[in-house]
């Protein structure tokens, strides 16, 4: 019994979220923060005429990402991300004893990504994406070998890069347009870069010994959480309720006629005109007081667009009823968009029987 109550409560809580979970349409912005793990990087170079090679290791760092983009309403969106990634070198592993490192390793730059929100019928939208961009380097290294003089190095350059994205967004029902996000990114820099080094000390004491090194391609794993806001998202509006007709002695039973439409159309087919003509004749025979004309759509397209399309369909049917002799004062027009489906479907489904107008003669 307790399990049933818990499931019922969870369903009630998730319903407004599911109703609000729609693909992003229009302009949106986002902000994320988290941690970055940088893979070790191969370094080959010379110091004072001696060759040396090894791998630089890094401690976990921190990351910030700002986003602006545009959603097309069908699950696809394009976005420009500007990131800042900070890591700290930890050690050099080579044929010589491992050396401790310090200072910083920064990367920042723009990435252009194409992302797809996957409709899975849950209160969250998982998404996948990827893209390309450019990352600037700003690095400074300082090695302190045990019992030896310190060595320092620097690198200021840049590289083309690509990234792969996997994440999930949770729409906040109480704040339309706002979603909480959790995301993983893999970034690969495509260029190898050179750095200049100097070693203080040496012979004579206090002299500086020059050196240089070549860094291999760098790759990073980024884990972030954040928020995204889509502009122009309206709160869900409950469909208007038809007025309850006043009680009348022995009312005639209501008759319903269905008029169907092609996908994304509000024009009447020849069969639709025949059905409307039958409804007009029957309304005159029973001396009706009101004819309810209600427009609907399937779930393809955005809720805002479907609301307008259902209204255009209802108006097209009402205009044909007036052409067939029904007074305008007897016609009540309603538009319900993609709600009240005749055939239940998930989001983004083109179902012919849901593209309709219902004529109810009372």
Image (spheres, grey):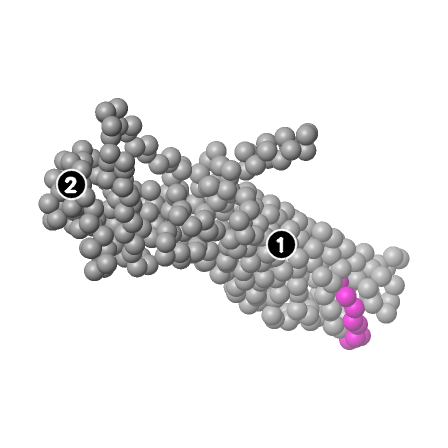
Residue 138 in view in this figure: no
Q: Which mark is residue 285?
A: 2
Q: Residue at x 48, y 51 (%)?
A: 346
Q: Residue at x 73, y 56 (%)?
A: 58
Task: Decide: is 167 above or below 8.
Answer: below
Percent x, y of residue 231: 40, 44
Residue neighbourhood size for the residue with mark 2, other residues' Cα within 10 Å, grouped as few (<14), some (14–19), many (≥20): few
Q: Which residue is mark 1?
A: 184
Front one among 283 and 12: 283
Q: Quadrant of the C terminus?
A: top left
Front one among 192 and 19: 19
Q: Is residue 46 left or right of residue 219?
A: right
Q: Residue at x 79, y 62 (%)?
A: 92
Q: Residue at x 27, y 47 (%)?
A: 257
Front one among 99 and 21: 21
Asked whether 41 falls inside the magenta stretch, the response is no
Q: Is residue 169 left or right of residue 5?
A: left
Task: Decide: is 333 above or below 183.
Answer: above
Q: Is residue 260 left or right of residue 8?
A: left
Q: Earlier in the sequence, mark 1 or mark 2?
A: 1
Name the residue furthest front: 250
How far apart, in angstroms, are the residues tagged by discs 1 and 2?
Answer: 66 Å
Magenta segment boundaries in residue numbering: 48-56
Q: Element at badge 2?
A: helix
């Amino acid at each position: 019994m307790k399990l049933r109550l818990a499931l019922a409560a969870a369903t009630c809580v998730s319903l407004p979220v599911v109703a609000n979970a729609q693909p992003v349409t229009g302009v949106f912005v986002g902000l994320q923060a988290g941690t970055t793990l940088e893979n070790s990087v191969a370094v080959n170079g010379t110091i004072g005429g001696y060759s040396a090679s090894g791998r630089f290791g890094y401690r976990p760092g921190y990351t910030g990402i700002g986003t602006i983009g545009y959603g097309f309403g069908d699950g696809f969106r394009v976005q420009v991300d500007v990131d800042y990634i900070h890591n700290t070198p930890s050690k050099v592993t080579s044929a010589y004893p491992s050396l401790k490192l310090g200072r910083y390793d920064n990367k920042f730059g723009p990435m252009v990504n194409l992302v797809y929100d996957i409709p899975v019928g849950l209160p969250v939208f998982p998404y996948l994406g990827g893209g390309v961009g450019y990352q600037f380097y700003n690095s400074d290294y300082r090695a302190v070998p045990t019992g030896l003089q310190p060595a320092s190095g620097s690198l200021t350059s840049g590289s083309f890069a690509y990234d792969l994205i996997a994440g999930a967004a949770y729409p906040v029902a109480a704040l339309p347009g706002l979603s909480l996000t959790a995301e993983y990114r893999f970034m690969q820099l495509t260029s190898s870069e050179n750095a200049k080094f100097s070693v203080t000390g040496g012979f004579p004491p206090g002299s500086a010994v020059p050196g240089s090194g070549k860094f291999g391609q760098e790759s990073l794993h980024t884990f972030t959480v954040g928020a995204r806001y889509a502009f122009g998202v309206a709160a869900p509006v409950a469909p208007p309720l038809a007025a309850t007709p006043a009680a009348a002695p022995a009312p005639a039973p209501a008759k319903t006629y269905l008029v169907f439409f092609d996908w994304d159309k509000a024009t009447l087919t020849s069969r639709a005109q025949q059905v409307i003509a039958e409804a007009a004749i029957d309304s005159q025979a029973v001396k009706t007081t009101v004819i309810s004309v209600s427009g609907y759509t399937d779930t393809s397209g955005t809720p805002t667009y479907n609301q307008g399309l259902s209204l255009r369909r209802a108006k097209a049917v009402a205009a044909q009823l007036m052409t067939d002799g029904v007074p305008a004062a007897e016609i009540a027009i309603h538009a319900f968009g993609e709600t009240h489906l005749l055939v239940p479907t998930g989001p983004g489904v083109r179902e012919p029987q849901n593209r309709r107008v219902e004529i109810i003669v009372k």
